[in-house]
Image (tube, helix red, strand yellow):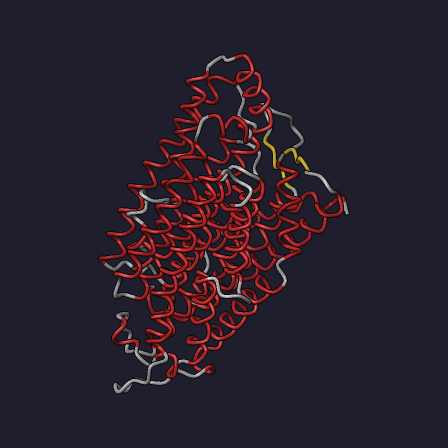
Amino acid sequence: MEIMRNFPCISIILCMCSAIVSSALPGKWARRLNVTIVLAVITLSGGTLVYSLAKGYETVYKMGRFPAPWGNEIRFGVLEAIMALFFSGILLLSVLGGSKKLKEDIDNFKENLYFVLLDLLLSSLLALIYTNDLFTAYVFVEICTIAACGLIMASERGRAIEAATRYMIYAQIGSGLLLFGLCILYDITGHLLMSNIKTQVIILASSGQYHIPLVISIVFIGTGLAIKSALFPFHAWLPDSYGYSPVPSAAILSSLVSKGYIFLLLKIFYRVFGLNIIQESHLFNILLIFGLAGMIFGSVSAILEQDIRRMIAFSSVAQIGYIYMGFGMGIRSGMVAAVFHIISHAASKSLLFISSAGLTDASGKNKTFKDLTGAAYRNKIAGAAFTTGALSMVGVPLFSGFISKLLFAKAAFETNAMTMVATLVCLAISTILNAVYFLKTVARIYTPATTEYETIRFKDNIPFGVACILFIILNLILGLASDPLVEFINRGLMMFS
């Protein structure tokens, strides 16, 4: 069983090697290699989860067996294994569900390059999940940014290139702030490993030394990752990036990339600064305010949209607000709710983007609501899948989104009176607004239409249908059997501490 401690490192290296090999393969074989590697990563992540649960505490894996500062470290426990397992599984389903659309959007001779980017993206996300070194995290943040930018502009359409340019500008501002924060932190602590930095930060905080540089580093790092994860009001790059990129790209970007940066921020809270120091810097209060504002603003913007994909994109602004609201509570239960919502939102948002493509295909490729009338009758599996994702986002019982909102509400009661009232009020308002635009869309696609469009059957796109069914099952499992996952998240956060 001890061999399982090598699985995280093997997962990252497999994805990087796959990217190199895929660059020399035809598109068809690059796609097959990508699917094989992702399946291998899912298996390795499952093994890592079993190993971490059996061990009961975090494992530190020294790369090349060299200690710091010469060597690098991977550090993992239950929570890292869960995130790696879900991230790789959702990426696989997103690619499967959007495979037909991908062939329409990308030239055949460039298809292999798309899978090179996917391999690099997955390797960077796994590295962000597992690494215990801040500079390594920064390097893979940049790899993730470049890969994500390539996935946005893969179709090479004008609006996609414009969206990728805007994304890169915002991403580099975020990366610059992150790097400034890391440089200040390295200057005052002399370390890059998270555990070593935390030891020095505790000493500095107790002695009162470098108080201002420490607070500045916290602000720079928090702001940088907030920009990259599209926290309101730093979300201007998001609607076009998700709305005009190829369907698999939109599903992956919305469900995984932003969450990778958020998970890195969570690690920095626990393993670099500690929650007490973050609390004293008042960063949690700022995140709470912006999170609550994002929940409302994102929902209002989604209501005003007439394009189904941009509506789903603006919905992501609101859902990212939920996650930061959980962080902003500054308590364990809020963090648990936020992490569960990362997983819940990833499963639901990918489903919404994939299924919306099926609805637009059944509506003459039109994405406006007036053209989507009756689309659920013309593509039944897409209609059922979109309805599932919509009900989950609203927070209807039986679906994963209901558990997220229940956890946020329960956590709110453990905070002070002002935070509790603000959280519960914004949660209620956001839920009502979610219902307005999602249930309106569900009603639209199930309204009989007078315009005749081609009917799409399950056998016309079997990978799409299979992906939708698996996503629906995943949402129901998260909604009906969430207790084990919530317990695992709790155990993982305890290991973080």
Q: Residue 421's spot in the image, x, y percent?
A: 44, 45
- The answer to whether one can see residue 335 in this image is yes
User: What residue occupies the far left of the structure in this picture?
Assistant: 158
Left or right: 489, with 317 as reference point: right
Question: Residue at coordinates 76% horizontally, 47% vertically from top-left?
Answer: 54
Viewer-nearest residue: 244 or 359: 359
Residue 456 location, quadrant: bottom left
Q: Quadrant of the C terminus?
A: top right
Q: Is residue 16 visible?
A: no
Residue at the (30%, 76%) spot, across then down: 372
Q: Position of residue 238 (x, y in %)?
A: 32, 51
Q: Position of residue 75 (x, y in %)?
A: 62, 37
For the point 37% across and 63% down, the residue is 247
Horizontal side, residue 427 vs residue 487: left or right: left
x, y percentage for residue 261?
A: 45, 42
Q: Is residue 256 above or below residue 419?
A: below
Q: Report the number of numbered marks.
A: 0
**Compared with residue 379, is residue 294 higher up or lower down, i.e. above or below?**
above
Closer to the camera in the image, 468 or 23 = 468
Q: Residue at x 46, y 68 (%)?
A: 97
